[in-house]
Image (cartoon, grey):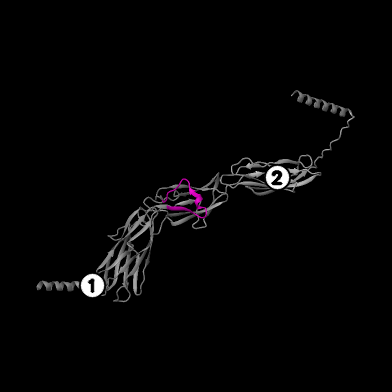
Amino acid sequence: MIRNRILAVAALLLAPALAHGQASISVSPATISGVNSGGPTTPPSFTLRFQQPNPPNNIVSFQAELCLPGPVGAAPGPLQSYTLTPGSAPNVLISCQTAIVNTASCPAPNAVVRILVGMAMAGQPVTSPLDVCTVTPVVRSGATIGSYPLDVQNHSAINAGGKPVAFVANDGTLVITGQGPVIAFTPDGAGAGPGTAITLTASGAIATTTIQASSAGSPGDPGGPNGAIQNCSFSGPDAAQFSFNPAVTFPITYTAGTARTDNFTVQCNRGPSDRNAQLRCQVQDRNGTRDEWYDLTCPRALPADLDLPPAAPITMPGGLVGQTVTTTLPVTVVTPGEPGAENATVNCVAAPLFMSISPASVTVPPGTNTAPPFTIGCTLGAGNRIGLVTCTIFDRDGMATRDYPVNCPAGAVLPPPRPIPAGSPWGWYLLGLLTLALGGLVAWRRLG
């Protein structure tokens, strides 16, 4: 019985403390990260946040101190500087400033931020939650990578009756990390499509270009976050004709603090017309995540460069009336066509009907060094005739036309056979020859 009464009294005494809990002042967020090179940098701000329990204690004023690692603005301290911004709330008086004198718990060269909070209206509890002081740190360039404490010290609170109230402090941590690398591309790609235009350099059946990615200019700090080229891919109407040579495996990691340079050779297969694709590389580095875009053009393979004689009149050889006389028109391959190109051609026509040309077309495939000539024909008449041969060239320079006037001279006419008189010496001579031939034939048949 006595034991049960003692437990009941203890429960009554503890009930207010359990119901009210304890107020707190905390570094929020508890962990703050910054970087330490490339000039002073500003990590996220943090606050000192006051929190009443639920239900609230009757806290009307409190104080606390924040110990910042020092020395500020010099090695080996992590901070170049910091700024303080007091919070605000109705009827609340807040002081947030750097103390002139250090304390035993936060000795020099550390910095002490002293906070005083009180209510303007007597007897009123402090509003909760309340950000009483915002600290914006600037990390010193070259600060040592590591974790630094943000200690909340010398904290106390009183209620409306002037009596101390339980008050908890929650410390924080400033984490100094190294910077990651900056991956620079040459040529620099556009951040989005359309991309940086690149026409690949032709070499036979293929064309190539080189894109460089390097962290040598800003490799970052050892221990900092790594960078990476997550992926590079081709897209577009002719994407299947583009590739990396040699092949590249992604992702590619750029370790912080270590310079790395990669040269990517982009290759395409040339065809009879320009081929196009887009290259997109996804990059993650110190500057965040971005895309590098390139608009690629694979130049067409060039057909042969052909030539014909200069446009000038052509005089055909002579002959008899009705005879077809001919001459040739050579086709010269100045430069053979490149692999993958379309054929070069020359088409010729002859007019009017007494003119002819063969063949009607000469085709020169890629890689061919010679071409057959055209044969021009003209049927001679009794008088001089004028014809025309027109040829059209389709080659790497486009289309060109040549006209050749053709002079067909008048054909010659043979005189009719003239009879030989029998009483003339020639007549007697021929008669003797015939007699001898006939006698020989008769003798041969008798002997046979």
Does 25 appear above or below 189? below
Work out whether residue 158 or residue 269 is closer to the camera in this orientation and state it: 269
Instruction: Identify residue type, mark 2.
Output: Ile
Write the residue at 43% across / 57% down. 289
Work out whether residue 115 or residue 272 is closer to the camera in this orientation and state it: 272
Report crowding for label 1: few under 14, some 14 to 19, many 20 or more residues within 10 A (C-alpha): few
Residue range corresponding to the magenta coloring: 229-251
Q: Quadrant of the C terminus?
A: top right
Write the residue at 35% across / 60% down. 32
Where's residue 290, x and y in %? 45, 57
Where's residue 44, x and y in %? 38, 61
Does 326 appear above or below 182? above
Where's residue 306, x and y in %? 65, 44
Q: Quadrant of the N terminus?
A: bottom left
User: Is residue 295 visible to us here?
Assistant: no
- In the rendered structure, find residue 321 and report the number of the disc placed on it: none
Q: Which residue is mark 2?
A: 357
Question: Is 97 on the left-hand or right-hand side of 283?
Answer: left
- In the rendered structure, find residue 19 and report the number of the disc placed on it: 1
Work out whether residue 228 or residue 54 is closer to the camera in this orientation and state it: 228
Circle 2: element type: strand
Does residue 236 belong to the magenta stretch? Answer: yes
Question: Is 403 on the left-hand or right-hand side of 31?
Answer: right
User: Is residue 50 visible to us here?
Assistant: yes
Question: Is 264 on the left-hand or right-hand side of 407?
Answer: left
Q: Which sits earlier in the primary sequence, circle 2 or circle 1?
A: 1
Where's residue 365, x and y in %? 60, 44
Circle 1: element type: helix
Write the residue at 28% across / 67% down. 24
Does residue 387 belong to the magenta stretch? Answer: no
Does 448 appear above or below 246? above
* Residue furthest to the right: 423
